[in-house]
Image (cartoon, rainbow, N blue to C red):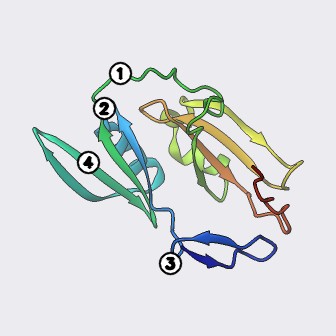
Amino acid sequence: MTAHAAPSGSATTTLPAPSPVFHHLALTCRDPIAVERFYTRYFGFRRARVAPLGDGKQIVFIRNAGMYLELFAADEVSPVPVGTSDGPHSPGVRHIAFKVDNVDATLSLMGDEVRQRITLGPVDFDGFIPGWRSVWLRDPEDNIVEVSQGFVDQDNPPVLTSATS
């Protein structure tokens, strides 16, 4: 491990060299093709790679800019209840988020099919960041997806303190 300087105002951290970059999120799906169509149609993803696994199974990678979703076919029934509102509040992934210029215009372009999937919002967060606004909806697998506008980094966020044993 090599110590790399963290962003200004942060503590130095130990990272593998070179610094890791977020690559993908893997989703296990009842219907991977429906999920692929949804993210392709509404969020601009395109098929990047298909990895055949044999027995008619495959892994499909879809890409939007530098972010990938890796789609697997489910082999089991989910023991986790369907998320509501802005996503599950139990440990795990709460939601997937996409930044857009204008939430309302994006929802309008997406049409009724997506508007019927809304689980919460749109909600304004002007008390935190002027212009921050989000809506949450379900994808075909009932994963919660946030569509958000106006989020910006904090100028000087509090520094993460060292863990003590």
Q: Nearer the viewer, residue 17 or 143?
A: 17
Give the Cα distance between marks 4 and 1: 18 Å
Marks 3 & 2, CB-CB < 8 Å contact: no
Which one is earlier in the sequence, the residue at label 3 or at label 2? 3
Q: CA distance from mark 2 to mark 1?
A: 7 Å
Classify mark 3: residues with Cα within 10 Å, few (<14), some (14-19) or many (20+).
few
Q: Is residue 102 left or right of residue 23?
A: right
Q: Residues within 10 Å of mark 2 (few under 14, many from 20)?
A: few
Q: Nearer the viewer, mark 3 or mark 1?
A: 3
Residue placed under numbered mark 4 in the picture: 59
Judge by depth and name the residue closer to the eye, 104 or 72: 72
Residue type (three-letter) at the residue carrying disc 2: Ala
Residue wearing tag 3: 18
Q: Which mark is residue 74?
A: 2
Disc 4 is placed on an element classified as: strand
For the residues bearing labels 2 and 1, Cβ distance under 8 angstroms: yes
Q: Is residue 87 left or right of residue 125?
A: left
Pick whichever, 113 or 5, lies toward us.
5
